[in-house]
């Protein structure tokens, strides 16, 4: 058959850097032997105590006809299940004193879908013919945003400043001098904690961004996939914020429920109505399972306890062990730094002066059955093709077993040392 795809169809169907990478990782995983060290994906860890909570709740639902019906047999309104939406609003009010009601909460099919909706709702060609962009005040930023624009060149991003915070340790900061908000800026967007670096933007950085967004009458989108109050994978002091001009996204994925595809957006009623409409058009309704599994612990506040007492310490410990292993294994064999680990599931390594691009390092590591993510994918929208830094970094997940992470770091050290020889 001889037919072509539309422009939008071509954009969505034509593949993406992240799509190819996920295929590559998936194929490597499928063909892997027992020695594969999967340090590449964003897969949360299997925490037995947490998995047991979900299993118990599923067993409870299966014994309760009304709950089973809510889980399996009804369409929720596009905004989300009303009881779940009310529970989230109450939890946020109780936790942070935010004045949010059900009209400020909206469900999406995972956080990823929320971003697809939000970016294309706010940016692109406007009714007056002008074009607007989503601005990322700091790259490296989450790879999953990179191919989500339905129009070309919908994103602009800003190269960060680098602070050396310790031996072999650094931290990115927003370069506010270079953060230029023109009339073409549709919204600002940051992840906090940041995927891939584990950076947590400071309260003062967030307050400054919020002020800039408010002054310019544009939204500030804060992606809280790893943040507070749940899943709470944040190892530093950081105050969660919300305001009428802030769009905060949460997700159940990093609580250990990525298969339920449950994203939660906290925003002004105008945004909530728009997202609900987009859900109705694209999917009628959202998956019920995550909402039904977590509703009782959302209502009781137990979700705060498990985030604080189980999930956060679990990942904080894993981060500490992985950092110690990197210091021991990398030693002084070659130039290296890791980003200060303040949250999320990853260590972000920078090898200054690396003689091969991180994409080649990725291939060499893959040959040796170690899967990481090469860093250049996270530097989208900044046009700094000649900035060596973007080819000198890799992202390594520490969510896997300690021995797997250790063995992976050992092989990374060997390959980086070989490249520097
Ligand atoms: C920063 C960030 N935002 C959003 C997402 C999307 O997650 P989900 O669609 O599973 O909620 C992820 C997933 O890894 C992420 O790392």
Image (cartoon, rainbow, N blue to C red):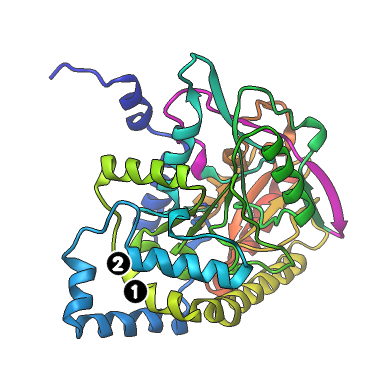
- The label number, if any, that marks residue 2 in the structure image: none
Range of residues picked out in magenta: 144-167
> In this picture, is 132 found above or below 164?
above
Give how far across and how far down residue 108 sits, in percent: 38, 52
- The label number, if any, that marks residue 293 in the structure image: 1
Residue occupying image coordinates x 44% and y 64%: 252
Q: Where does label 2 land, which residue?
A: 289
Given residues 105 and 4, the one toward you in this image is: 105
- Residue 86 seen: yes
Q: Is the residue marked by circle 2 packed among few (<14), some (14-19), or many (20+) residues within 10 Å?
A: some
Q: Is the residue marked by circle 1 packed among few (<14), some (14-19), or many (20+) residues within 10 Å?
A: many
Q: Can residue 8 be found in the magenta stretch?
A: no
Which quadrant: the N terminus?
A: top left
Give how far across and how far down residue 25 sits, in percent: 43, 50
Cα distance, mark 1 to mark 2?
6 Å
The reply, left or right, for residue 257 in relation to residue 171 is left
Residue occupying image coordinates x 79% and y 52%: 204
* Residue contact at pointers 1 and 2, CB within 8 angstroms: yes
Determine whether the residue tagged by mark 1 lies in a helix, strand or loop: helix
Which quadrant: the C terminus?
A: top right
Residue 33 lies in quadrant: bottom left
């Amino acid at each position: 058959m001889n037919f072509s795809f539309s422009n939008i169809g071509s954009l969505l169907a034509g593949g993406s850097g992240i799509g190819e990478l996920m295929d590559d990782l998936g194929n490597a995983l499928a063909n892997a032997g027992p020695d594969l060290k999967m340090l590449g994906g964003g897969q949360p860890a299997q925490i037995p105590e947490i998995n047991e909570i979900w299993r118990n709740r599923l067993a409870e639902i299966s014994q309760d006809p009304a709950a089973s019906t809510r889980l399996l047999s009804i369409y929720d309104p596009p905004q989300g299940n009303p009881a779940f939406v009310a529970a989230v609003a109450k939890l946020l009010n109780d936790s942070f004193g935010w004045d949010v009601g059900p009209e400020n909460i909206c469900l999406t099919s995972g956080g990823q879908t929320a971003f697809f909706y939000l970016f294309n709702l706010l940016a692109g060609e406007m009714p007056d013919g002008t074009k607007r962009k989503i601005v990322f005040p700091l790259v490296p930023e989450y790879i999953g945003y990179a191919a989500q624009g339905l129009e070309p060149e919908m994103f602009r991003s800003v190269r960060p400043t680098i602070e050396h915070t310790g031996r072999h340790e650094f931290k990115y900061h927003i370069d506010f001098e270079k953060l230029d908000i023109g009339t073409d800026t549709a919204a600002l967007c940051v992840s906090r904690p940041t995927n891939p670096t584990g950076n947590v933007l400071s309260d003062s950085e967030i307050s400054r961004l919020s002020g800039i967004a408010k002054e310019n009458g544009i939204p500030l989108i804060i992606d809280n996939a790893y943040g507070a109050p749940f899943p709470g994978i944040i190892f530093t002091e950081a105050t969660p914020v919300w305001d009428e001009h802030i769009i905060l996204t949460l997700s159940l994925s990093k609580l250990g429920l990525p298969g339920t595809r449950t994203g939660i957006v906290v925003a002004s009623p105008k945004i909530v109505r728009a997202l609900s409409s987009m859900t109705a058009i694209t999917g009628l309704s959202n998956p019920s399972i995550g909402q039904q599994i977590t509703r009782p612990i959302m209502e009781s506040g137990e979700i705060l306890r498990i985030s604080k007492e189980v999930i956060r310490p679990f990942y904080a410990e894993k981060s500490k062990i992985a950092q110690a292993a990197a210091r021991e294994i990398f030693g002084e064999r070659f130039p290296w730094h890791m980003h200060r680990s303040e949250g999320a599931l990853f260590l972000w390594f920078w090898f200054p002066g690396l003689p091969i691009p991180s994409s080649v390092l990725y291939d060499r590591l893959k040959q040796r059955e170690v899967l990481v993510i090469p860093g250049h994918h996270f530097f989208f929208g900044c046009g700094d093709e000649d900035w060596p830094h973007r080819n000198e970094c890799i992202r390594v997940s520490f969510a896997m077993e300690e021995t797997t992470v250790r063995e992976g770091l050992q092989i990374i050290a060997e390959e980086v040392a070989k490249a520097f020889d």
